[in-house]
Amino acid sequence: MIYKFRRGKGKVMDQEYIIAHADKSVMKISGLRVKGLNTKKLEQILMEKLHTVVRVIGVTGESIEMDAYDIEPDQVRKNEKGLIEILALTEGITATEVAQISCSEKIVEVIYDQIPEKPISACAKERWIKRS
């Protein structure tokens, strides 16, 4: 869901905000050997397994990071063995003996009214780290 807000007096617009709301978890599966991976195919496989939208956001030779929408981290962790088995059947991925979900956490929600009028820092990443 995307909301667009305008702040200002009368016809003068001082600032414009776009707030995007997405209920998502970020997970990282480590202990893999990844080579020649088709990320779109992997996303499709994971969407069918988790019954939700999944976007791969990072791939290394040993791990995969992804966003999973409208699913709780606990649900993902309960399904860890099945998920890793599915991944191991995907072309370009081999699971090792230590394959596991090494991270599964909910994205932090930010309250609109608590967003400062002026940036806390020039670095966008630092601004959000300081908010949580």
Image (cartoon, rainbow, N blue to C red):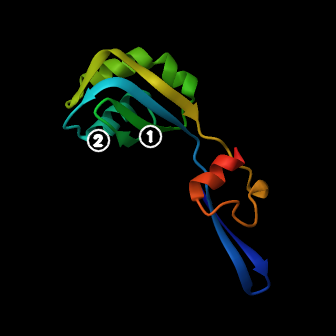
Q: Of label 1 and label 2, which has the lower sequence position?
A: 2
Q: Quadrant location of residue 80?
A: top left
Report the residue at 72% width, 79% height from top: 14
Q: Judging from the image, what secondary structure is the residue with disc 1 in?
A: loop
Report the residue at 74% width, 57% height from top: 115
Q: Which mark is residue 79?
A: none
- Tell me the kind of residue under disc 1: Val
Frontmost residue, 126 versus 68: 126
- Local packing at callout 1 (Cα closer than 10 Å; few below 14, some 14-19, many 20+) is some
Location of residue 120 in the rendering, given as x and y in whole percent from the top left corner: 70, 60
Location of residue 76 in the rendering, given as x and y in whole percent from the top left corner: 49, 24
Q: Is residue 30 above or below residue 132?
A: above
Image quarter hosting the N terminus? bottom right
Compared across the picture, whether 18 is left or right of 86 comes to right
Label 2 near label 1: C-beta < 8 Å? no
Q: Which mark is residue 39?
A: 2
- Local packing at callout 2 (Cα closer than 10 Å; few below 14, some 14-19, many 20+) is some
Q: Is residue 75 above or below residue 71?
A: above
- Tell me the kind of residue under disc 2: Thr
Q: Quadrant location of residue 29?
A: top left
Residue, disc 1: 53
Q: Quadrant location of residue 40?
A: top left
Compared across the picture, whether 83 is left or right of 11 comes to left
Location of residue 22 in the rendering, given as x and y in whole percent from the top left corner: 57, 47
Report the residue at 44% width, 40% height from top: 53
Q: Judging from the image, what secondary structure is the residue with disc 2 in?
A: helix
